[in-house]
Image (cartoon, helix red, strand yellow):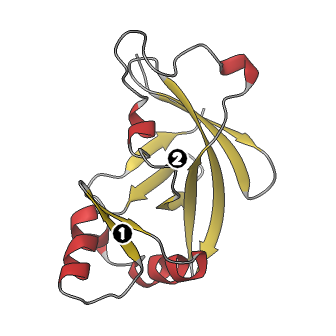
């Protein structure tokens, strides 16, 4: 079963993403697209499924498992990802948590954050987070090696 990312335009910079993972679990995210410097970024935030998509996934019956993308957002927080758009595809590059962790441990960046059992959550203002994303947008090590590549349908 293929993974499906369905973007529903709300306006020219805001979308509702209905994501169906390979097991058929569905989740919704509010997406805002912002240009920082010469790069586009997506801001993911948990959203509400449209009525027609309710009941076709969510938590897989009897397992308590969330949709794969929803698991990234165990806490209801914003997630930033770099976005590259071409005629044929979208390329979504997620930040590399270990890169950010090393910067913090070495005190190379001072950005408000809270430690969790699994790492940390950035708690800086949107303006500070945007400056951070813009600063590291061209640093290859700042992103996971394998971007998510979506073909347009």
Dividing the picture into quarters, in which one does residue 135 lie? Answer: bottom left
- Which label lies toward us, 2 or 1? 1
Quadrant position of residue 23: top left
Look at the picture and state if 3 lies above or below 119: above
Question: Considering only order in the chain, which callout, 1 or 2, is on the residue closer to the N terminus?
Answer: 2
Going 36% across and 24% down the picture, which residue do you hit?
Answer: 65
Residue that appears at 67% across and 35% down: 48
Looking at the picture, tell me which residue is in the foreground, 33 or 48. 48
Front in this rendered view, residue 122 or 2: 122
Q: How many marks?
A: 2
The x and y percentages for residue 29 are 60, 42
Q: Where residue 121 sits in the image (x, y, percent)?
A: 38, 64
Element type at mark 1: strand
SS state under label 2:
strand
7 shown above or below 115: above
Question: Residue lying farthest right?
Answer: 11
Q: Which residue is mark 2?
A: 89
**Residue in the foreground of this view, choosing between 124 and 148:** 124
Above or below for 15 versus 4: below
What residue did someone put label 1 on? 114
Q: Is residue 105 left or right of residue 92?
A: left
Q: Around disc 2, counting alpha carbons within 10 Å, would you say few (fewer than 14), some (14 to 19), or many (20 or more)?
A: few
Q: Position of residue 31 (x, y in %)?
A: 63, 51
Q: Residue at x 34, y 15 (%)?
A: 63
Tell me how far mark 2 sits from mark 1, CA to CA.
35 Å
Q: Position of residue 41 (x, y in %)?
A: 55, 65
Considering depth in this image, is 16 or 85 the residue closer to the camera?
16
């Amino acid at each position: 079963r293929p993974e499906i990312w369905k973007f529903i335009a709300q306006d020219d910079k805001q979308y509702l993403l209905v994501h169906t993972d390979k097991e058929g679990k569905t989740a919704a995210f509010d997406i805002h697209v912002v240009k920082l410097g010469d790069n586009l970024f997506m801001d993911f935030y948990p959203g509400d499924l449209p009525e027609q998509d309710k009941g076709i996934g969510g938590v897989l019956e009897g397992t308590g498992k969330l949709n794969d993308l929803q698991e990234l957002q165990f806490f209801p927080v914003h997630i930033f990802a770099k976005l590259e758009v071409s005629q044929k595809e979208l390329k979504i590059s997620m930040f590399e948590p270990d890169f950010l962790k090393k910067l913090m441990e070495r005190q190379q960046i001072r950005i408000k954050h809270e430690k969790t059992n699994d790492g940390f959550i950035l708690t800086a203002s949107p303006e500070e987070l945007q400056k951070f994303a813009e600063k590291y947008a061209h640093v290859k090590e700042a992103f996971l090696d394998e971007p998510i590549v979506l073909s347009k349908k």
